[in-house]
Image (cartoon, rainbow, N blue to C red):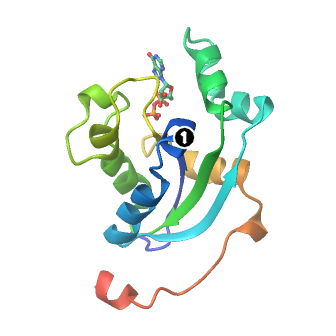
Amino acid sequence: MSEHERTFVMVKPDGVQRGLIGDIVSRFEDRGLKMVGGKFMQIDQELAEEHYGEHEDKPFFDGLVDFITSGPVFAMVWEGQDATRQVRNMMGETDPAESAPGTIRGDYGLDLGRNVIHGSDHEDEGANEREIELFFDEDELVDWDQIDSSWLYE
Ligand code: IDP
């Protein structure tokens, strides 16, 4: 399993408005994951529709696009062993109401349509790479060595 697996993560507009960026970043840092990209940005309609394209036939699609474009987001790329699945585990379930306390959605959310964070789906092969490419140019990602890596990985 590669220590260099990368995954796409985003604090959604509700998480930004509620001042949760710092806490969410801390959780991933504490876990040992390494941030290799990060940008505070406003998503436009086109990017929103592409990002959530798989849901375009769902009844909640228009509301989802309106929500994700309603204010700034903090988009990130995190790297580490099994990063995509581990981030999803830390996020909790899609519905905060079904998410265990201790997870991000379980600690900070109550409603399905306001679930604070996005992370690439580990069950959708290649979703992480596709989403990273959609949000980041190659030169916006930074290769760097974390000084504690020999204490994180055997
Ligand atoms: P995920 O974010 O946990 O990967 P997806 O099924 O990919 O979940 O759905 C994308 C987003 O769409 C969810 O995070 C949530 O904000 C929203 N969503 C999903 N299902 C519903 C729904 O039934 N009603 C309203 N919003 C929904």
> Could you tell me if residue 82 is visible in this image?
no
Circle 1 residues within 10 Å: few <14, some 14–19, many ≥20:
many
As drawn, 143 above or below 75: below
Q: Please give left or right for residue 43 compared with residue 61 in the image.
A: right
Quarter residue 71 falls in: top right
Q: Is residue 129 left or right of residue 34?
A: right
Query: How far across and down, in percent of the image, does residue 32 sit?
Result: 36, 73
Q: Is residue 92 above or below residue 5?
A: above
The residue lying at 45 percent from left, 39 percent from top is: 116
Counting the numbered discs, the total is: 1
The residue at the far top in this view is: 59
Q: Say which of 133 and 9 sits in front.
A: 9
Q: Considering only vertical position in the picture, is 19 above or below 67? A: below
Dividing the image into 4 quarters, which one contains the C terminus?
bottom left
Residue type at the position of mark 1: Lys
Nearer the observer, 144 or 130: 144
Q: Secondary structure at mark 1?
A: loop
Q: Looking at the picture, how far across and down is residue 60, in whole percent?
A: 55, 13
| Image position, residue 132 (x, y; %) | 64, 54
Q: Is residue 65 left or right of residue 124?
A: right
- At x 44% / y 91%, what residue is drawn? 147
Q: Circle 1 sits on which residue?
A: 12
Res 124 seen here: yes
Ligand 1 has an atom within 8 Å of the beta carbon of the residue at disc 1: yes
Image quadrant for the N terminus? bottom left
Residue at image coords 71%, 27%? 49
Q: Which residue is located at x 77 percent, y 60 percent?
A: 137
